[in-house]
Amino acid sequence: MRTQNGLTRKQAQVISELEKLARRAGLRVSAGKLVFAGLRLKQGGCLLRREPWLVLDRLQPFEEQLDVLRRALDGAALAPGVLEGLSDEARAVLAGSG
């Protein structure tokens, strides 16, 4: 069964876990449909008022959302133990094998 965004429940769960991990790593995360005034905005990382943000486009396929999350988390300083509590699926995705 697929969610409203076309993802399976397992895919949506992995995205949600990685978003939480990004928040724990100090990123502000915003996700939604990136269409404004008829323009399609681009997802990715940015600085806004000196704060690191990660903007995800819910209309993009699972693999593209994962790529954005992986790149953001690669550049983030993850404190020891921050990966605890992640599902095996989310760990595999971060390791590049999921």
Image (cartoon, rainbow, N blue to C red):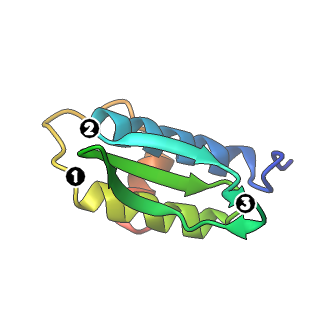
| Residue 26 numbered mark, or none | 2
Q: Label 2 sits on what residue type?
A: Gly
Mark 3 secondary-structure assignment: loop
Q: What secondary structure is found at the residue carrying circle 1?
A: loop
Tag 3 and tag 2, C-beta contact below 8 Å = no
Q: Amino acid at mark 1?
A: Ala
At 22% from the left and 60% from the top, the residue drawn is 75
Label 2: element kind: loop
Examine the rendered structure and indicate whether residue 52 appears above or below residue 6: above
Kindly report the distance in space between the C-alpha atoms of the residues bearing marks 3 and 2.
24 Å
Q: For marks 3 and 1, give the CA distance.
A: 25 Å
- Identify the residue under disc 1: 76
Q: Is residue 81 left or right of residue 89?
A: left
Say if 66 sits above or below 1 in the image.
Answer: below
Characterize the local packing of mark 2: few (<14), some (14-19) or many (20 or more) Cα atoms within 10 angstroms. some
Q: Residue at x 37, y 48 (%)?
A: 53
Q: Are marks 3 and 1 in contact (CB under 8 Å)?
A: no
Residue 7 place in picture, x, y as percent:
74, 54
Q: Nearer the viewer, residue 12 or 31?
A: 31
Q: Percent from the top left, x then y, of residue 5?
A: 78, 52
Circle 3 packing at 10 Å, graded few (<14), some (14-19), many (20+), is: some
Say few, some or many: other residues with alpha carbon within 10 Å of mark 1 (under 14 / 14 to 19 / 20 or more): some
Q: Quadrant of residue 35?
A: bottom right
